[in-house]
Amino acid sequence: MAAQFGRRLRKGAATTAVAAVAVAALSASQAPGVSADSHGRQTTGADVGQDAGATGDDGTATGNSRYYTDLPPLDSPNPSPTAGSGTPAATGDAEAGIPASVLDAYKKAEESLRASKPGCNLPWQLLAAIGKVESGQARGGRVDANGTTLSPILGPVLNGNGFASISDTDHGAYDGDSTYDRAVGPMQFIPSTWDWAGRDGNDDGKKDPNNIYDAALAAGHYLCRFDHDMSVQAQMNQSILSYNNSTAYLNTVLSWVEFYRKGTHEVPDGTGTLPSHHSDDATTPSPGTTPPASSHPDNSPKPPKSTPPTTPPTKPPTTPPSTPPATPPTTPPTTPPTATETVDHLADAGSGKLTATAGGTFAQKIVVRTEDKADKAVARVRVRFTIVGDTDATFTGGENVATVMTNGLGAATAPALVAGEKTGDFTVRATVVGRVLAGLDHKATVTAREADALARTGDTALTCVPGGEFADQVEVKATYKGAVAGKVAATATLVKSADDATENDKGPSFKDADGKTVRTLKDLTTDADGLLKLPKLYADDTTGTFLLRITTTGGATLTVELTVAAAPEPSGTPAA
């Protein structure tokens, strides 16, 4: 199995020599910033960018659940025996193999993120590294033809026994546990995170954490949220730590990223190599930790043998003490409540009116405060903001959920809201992570883009003979407060007169795809430069002056004259 040089070496001087050679070779083979620890493990010195020792909760993707600690082996063309066991070890070539469906899912997720979030610069090798550490690449690629795992991959019960305590949030729908949550699937999302981070990566209409295509795409979006750029090391580190808040986890993932960047190859599904050491294994220390005393070699110093006393012990008194010993307390000591447990409600902290034009950024941000029963602020509490309703508005970074820690004044400020193209109202709901409390809703409104002025781009007179077509098409430019008004809705109607805006029943007209007469065009939109070019106009047999009226959202109006007249007689032609 993998990471032979990552295991503890237990067998005396010969093994120590092997370890020394391994460390030297590994250190020489890595990219800048990558080194080896005292056990020959591959590690990466990284700028963590945040407190990696902070207590985790469901603010992370995995709930800080366990993970595989096996690290990449030295690249070796031939298998080498495991120290002291005679069992062939996995080689670099074997570990570089990634099951076909799993590798395809990672690359498709990278391609999708390159289109939707190009500034993230997500490499598929990062997804592969997390997939290796979280599930051993879906247990060596044990997935069906659609990429769904053949059997569930579940993390340990998150009941506070060695891990975070996260009560059930999905009624057991994902993890089968209606009491506590468990990390689920090849990328090990906890249910409360999957609810907002889940994606449909294989276009089957479902978001399934047990499907490698769905899970890989969800992991990519999770890592790229808040505009993190994976080409910036500190930002990549922060994203990895938000997946599982542990420096050892960060270094393990980065080690696999570097390993996979050196080259990988595809292997059949179900044949990938499987890791064997977990972060909660009692016999396998995490990178950088000191092995327990019981793992010392047999030649470690022994404590001196004790010499029995020459004087017999004093005989205990035969008379019992007159005062009986104190009865131990029957009530266990109470544990003070956490900051989250003291929160009684959420209060608005001056968010203001939330209104933006389609495609724009909301000027106001949502600010809430966590308070106890006495209306006093509670600091260091996680607040989740969720966009609810029929809208394509998002937070900065393209997500519809954001989790923020309250500051020393108990205030949490949501990321800026960015309006989409859908107009109308929606809701941003604030809730306290880890508590079942009423949410605090904020109404937000997206209004249509507007124009307050229209002008023709040309000044040529628009004339036509009866039964003919106008040579020039009408083109106008829309502006709003002097600036270009792009993507503004408009309507064009051939009206009866300047005082009667009803549709004319004679004179010039447009034609539809079937050649039928049309005198009103709806659902028109100016382009990004504020320009709108109308289709060709055609004249019937009626002569005279006619009016074309163009209006936009915001009240801009332009009336254009159209003249239909018989062609003048050629000069010198005798009258009939």
Image (tube, helix red, strand yellow):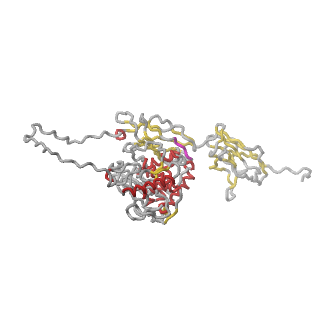
Q: Is residue 91 above or below residue 220?
A: below
State the residue at coordinates (73%, 53%).
Answer: 538
* Residue 554 position by quadrant: top right
483 up-or-down from 564: above or below: above
- Magenta-span inclusion, residue 419: yes
SS assignment for the magenta stretch, majority: loop
Q: Position of residue 404 (x, y in %)?
A: 45, 41
Q: Nearer the viewer, residue 357 or 254?
A: 254
Q: Quadrant of the N terminus?
A: bottom left
Residue 454 in view of the camera: yes
Between 102 and 322, which is closer to the camera in this rendering? 322
Instruction: Please state the horizontal and vertical placement of residue 429, each as a whole percent of the image.
Output: 44, 43
Magenta span includes 407: no
Q: Is residue 316 left or right of residue 286?
A: left
For residue 381, what is the image quadrant?
A: top left
Q: Is residue 101 visible?
A: no
User: How many labels were placed on the picture?
Assistant: 0
In this view, which residue lies farthest toward the left? 319
Residue 113 drawn at (x, y percent): 54, 53
Magenta-colored span: 416-420
Q: Tell me which residue sits at (72%, 52%) in the image.
A: 536
Q: Is 219 placed left or right of 375 in the picture?
A: right
Expressed as whole percent of the image width and height from the top left, the position of residue 230 reads: 53, 48
User: Which residue occupies the foreground of this view, 564 or 263?
Assistant: 263
Q: Nearer the viewer, residue 158 or 341?
A: 158
